[in-house]
Amino acid sequence: MPDLASTSVFLDFDGTVTLADTGVQVLRSLGRPGWEQIDRDYREGRIGSREVLIREWPLVAGGVDAARQVARQVATDPGFGPLADALRDAGAEVTVISDGFGLTVEEVCEQIGVACLTNAVNEQGELVFPWQDRCCPCSTCGVCKQAPIKEARRRGRTTVLVGDGVSDRKAALLADVIFAKDDLADWCDDAGVDYRPFARLRDVHRALLGREPPEPREPPEPCEAAEPREPREPPEPCEAAEPGEAAGTR
């Protein structure tokens, strides 16, 4: 395992930090007919993640308040807080990178004190993409997950990716160490990309820290909306994915 004092760890949100994909849960609860085919087009590589989100968001009935209420019902992996604390105590940088609707990402990360890059829904109920990269050769993602990995590597840091879905594939092409499960693990098997399997974040904790994680914290109170913060400067453009790769999941 890498020297954590010179390591940057990037965690996907939906299905990695959370125990289920919040976007899928919202669509299953509130989605109007048609979202399943859009999602299928995305998973099969016919459209990118930004397009799938733009097309699916108008199909969510009830607006942002109803959607956020459903998203808040999705549990967070209880190992997230202990993992983030232990990594930072060891000198590692920890960032959550999410390419979904972004309904609860900032709320969850703020409770743990972890930085995040995410799409968001603004006060007008519009889906916005503050971390898209129009200069990227693929330019199809909502959040460019390769860009922060490139930036960390440029600073001489070892990069670790923890993910589960389609949106993590391009980042996996660059990360030095990959922890994968579900769709991402299947893709790594097919593409011949080395990875370490995990089921929950306790497994990642054990692998990176070399010890059993402590008992998880008490579950936090239901999320309150985070105060808006000044946007950071976008990272550098990302590299193109290998030909034929699909563009990203939540």
Image: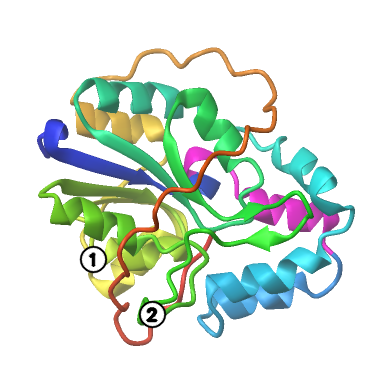
Q: Which residue appears at 24% of the width and 42% of the height?
A: 8
Q: Which residue appears at 23% of the width and 66% of the height?
A: 193
**How many numbered marks does the figure carry?**
2
Residue 53: where, in percent of width, then height? 65, 67
Q: Which residue appears at 53% of the width and 77% of the height?
A: 48
Question: In the image, 177: left or right of 95?
Answer: left
The stretch in magenta equals: 16-31
Whether residue 76 is visible to the viewer of this picture, yes or no, is no
Asked if residue 247 is positioned above or below residue 73 in the image, the reply reads below
Q: Which residue appears at 81% of the width and 60% of the height?
A: 60
Majority secondary structure in the magenta region? helix
Secondary structure at numbered mark 1: loop
Residue 115: where, in percent of width, then height? 42, 37
> 10 Å neighbourhood of mark 2: few (<14), some, or many (≥20)?
some
Residue 165: where, in percent of width, then height? 47, 59
Mark 1 — residue?
193
Whether residue 33 is visible to the viewer of this picture, yes or no, is yes
**Residue closest to the eye, 148 or 87:** 148
